[in-house]
Image (tube, coloured by chain):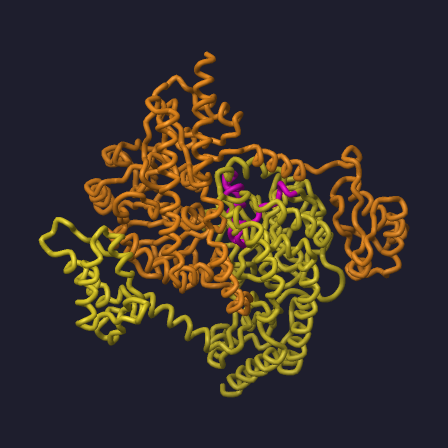
Chain colours: A orange, B yellow
Amino acid sequence: MLVLSHDSQVPLYTQLYSQIKGAILSGRFAADSRLPSVRDLARQHLISRNTVENAYLELYAEGYIYSKERSGYFVSPLSPDDVLVSPPARGAARETVQETQCLFDFHPARLDAEAFPERIWRKCLLDALHRGSRDLNHYSEAQGEGTLRGEIRKYLEQSRGVVCDIDQIVVCGGLQHGLDIVAHLLKDSRPVVAVEDPGYHLARSVFANHSLEVLPLPVLDEGLDLRALQDSRSTVAYVTPSHQFPMGCVMPIANRLKLLRWAREGGNFIIEDDYDSELRYHGRPIPSLQGLDPDGNIVYSGTFSKVLSPALRVSYLVLPHSLLPAYRRLFSDYAPSVSVLEQRALAQFMEQGHWERHVRRVRTLYRKKHDALLRALARHCGERASVIGQGAGLHVVVQLHDTAVKEEELVAAARHSGIKLFPFSTTCVNRKPEEGMVILGFGGLSIDRIEEGVALLFQSQQKRISAE
Amino acid sequence: MLVLSHDSQVPLYTQLYSQIKGAILSGRFAADSRLPSVRDLARQHLISRNTVENAYLELYAEGYIYSKERSGYFVSPLSPDDVLVSPPARGAARETVQETQCLFDFHPARLDAEAFPERIWRKCLLDALHRGSRDLNHYSEAQGEGTLRGEIRKYLEQSRGVVCDIDQIVVCGGLQHGLDIVAHLLKDSRPVVAVEDPGYHLARSVFANHSLEVLPLPVLDEGLDLRALQDSRSTVAYVTPSHQFPMGCVMPIANRLKLLRWAREGGNFIIEDDYDSELRYHGRPIPSLQGLDPDGNIVYSGTFSKVLSPALRVSYLVLPHSLLPAYRRLFSDYAPSVSVLEQRALAQFMEQGHWERHVRRVRTLYRKKHDALLRALARHCGERASVIGQGAGLHVVVQLHDTAVKEEELVAAARHSGIKLFPFSTTCVNRKPEEGMVILGFGGLSIDRIEEGVALLFQSQQKRISAE
């Protein structure tokens, strides 16, 4: 910003000139960025166009700026040594380089790059804009568009067995935003939140940021250790019963009923994170916990990030009736968190059956990738490892039998080969991170790349071992 | 959701039939909604298509469902008395009725319904989708897209005098989301947050929800009462220095320097909410506080809600360097909060100069509405009232000289005439709400409607007074 003093003895055009010059030299005005037009700048500062013209002409004469016919003036690119490059520019560049060096991204939260239904989404988005542009002048419904909540309710009932009405649904900008709300709703009771260990680290961050007491409990073959839960002081359990993250196990019905009883009898709360239950490759989908006890203290959380896109930022909560009064009290003043255009596009996408078709399509797509990963693992590390948690979702866990393998070294060696691994230890708190545990997400890689990546990963590991 | 038991003695088709029937009778399956296709339902439950077909045929024969050629089966509309209509449907209907009854909406956060740049936004959105659909498979940059932060930085520097680099900028889903972050960053110091009284109620809600101590301080003619601030235990001041909400005053430079000194010397923080500073109708724009002390403890908050759209949900924070370590520590695991498509559309919108042009265009538009409102007020209530805070933004405050007028009655009488008033008392905490204070937002009404609405409002008030 230019700050001109009308009282100064320095002529206005000189003030302008030296300030723009300073901004260019310091790198604050980026190379090749356009300067405001003479008219705009004059109007903005209530000075004459001549004053601006004079300042610009001087800068031009000395080579600080250049002009393009009918486009105005632009900042000349200067040698990097002359310019105090600002940290952001360096930061941005660094990040890009890092991204391009990664040839195989086995992160568990990557989707197929081609799978987004671009054509249909464009149509839905354009319809939303066309029909709704007059509605962009005010805040939309705080809990989310009624039409979208209606579609979510219908989908949840038909596919997930969730029983609710749309007053219980809150459209959120991602799981963490949803958990933010839940943390606010629960915190007056000074809750002790039991979390799965290993478990979803993003959820833990939210609880910790709200200064809630977080109690990591072990995960057994059937999910959260319920005996440990019962013996603990926990008053809230955050669980992923349909597909435990990261171990992939399903909580059996006996345990579900036990967990529900724990909540009911103790006046405790369950947060059911049903993040990717659409993606189950064999057998019937696992119905939600919420549907087993719709009047219980269960907060159900779902997301569009695992099947549609994690970059669109749409998720939802189903709040139990017991939390609705607190929700209305605390959040009545809040504006919604997701763009109304995106909400309406999504509502139309669901209403016209595209969501249902999309789920079916990507389920097949990811099943093929999943199968390819298992084949590649069988081929390239065979007896050296077991696979845990297959049959669903976007990742499996590989347990290497050579437990002397240090995760740090494994991840570093992989990175050296252009392979990005999401460290298993990220998901652990107290649990001693098993050495040789590897999370392999397959959503973002093509079938060929999965095969290649696994070969490379286990070759390099093999080499490392041989070298020792 | 339908839950079928393969072990039951009840045939599968009967289970299906009775569950669907129950769902229709209870209203859980809405009238005219489509049932899953025979094939889908069969596949979903791993049962034969015949089983589903049989269940559907039975329901059809008894009139529970009807069929449309080549579209499948739909739920028959039943008499409302037979169906347990779910509360959400009633809620949604009620809301719509209320909306249509409002003929003149003087809410201060309404924009012009025609002003949204639909054509250009469509172009930007389509470009973002076209170029970026492959990027929808992973989380985007946590603090917001680099390109958008770059454009925001440039704009803030040129138009608001904010000095920062893009590492300090966090793209948020609205002011409240931004304040949520700030509350997390500050809360370890157990801050006492001074807020303006009257002031922005939505900000107060956020602080209160984070259990921060909120200290309302009076607003004088020059904004927040700085003597009261200095005498208080406050460690954070939330202010709207360029256009106090709702009173509309500008904090003069002498006060700004005093406020900055208060922050610097006491190690205190300032949250500068610069929500609508683009909309100033006379004289030069008021530069930001942040620009006066870029290294100070100032959190700068800006939004696209007041000039572009409140329904798109995009705002931003500029964090001071002193809070960046805490931000990285607390939020390193967080996903971004705004759709990457919208962020990129906005970045292109700004980069191509549309934002600058749009700001100019709506400034003229709202200046005309503002002037029309002042004319209408002069005509229809003349000596009976004074206008406070004109010359900027999207609202003015009217002080009726007849202080016997009760706000409740005023708002009720207005509602009776189809006029929606935002009660002034909503903005007040300790301050005794002045009787006869009226906030009139003019953004959402056409010039004709402003004239009409003001006439109606003061006629009805006049009538009420005469009637007494």
- From the viewer's perspective, tell me whether residue A329 is left or right of residue B116: left
**Quarter of the image where the N terminus of chain B is located:** bottom left
Q: How many labels sit on residues?
A: 0
- From the viewer's perspective, tell me whether residue A197 is left or right of residue B468: left
Residue situated in front as seen by the camera: B102 or B145: B145
Q: Position of residue A98 (x, y in %)?
A: 58, 33
> Is residue B433 visible in the rendered structure shown here?
no
Q: Is residue B242 magenta?
A: no
Q: Position of residue A466 (x, y in %)?
A: 44, 14
- From the viewer's perspective, tell me whether residue B404 is left or right of residue B1: right
> Is residue A284 visible in the rendered structure shown here?
yes
Q: Say if A329 sits above or below A137 in the image.
A: above
Residue situated in front as seen by the camera: A303 or A465: A465
Q: Is residue B187 magenta?
A: yes
Principal secondary structure, stretch drawn in magenta: helix
Q: Quadrant of residue B98?
A: bottom left
Q: Say if A183 sits above or below A412 in the image.
A: below
- From the viewer's perspective, tell me whether residue B284 is left or right of residue A402: right
Query: What residue is at 63 percent from the left and 45 percent from the top?
Result: B298
Q: Quadrant of residue A151?
A: bottom left
Q: Position of residue B420 (x, y in %)?
A: 51, 74
Residue situated in front as seen by the camera: A198 or A118: A118
Q: Quadrant of residue A54?
A: bottom right
Q: Give the magenta range.
A: B166-191
Q: Say if A195 sits above or below A328 in the image.
A: above
Query: What residue is at 36 percent from the left and 46 percent from the top?
Result: A364
Q: Position of residue B228 (x, y in %)?
A: 61, 51
Q: Give the farthest residue toward the left.
A: B9
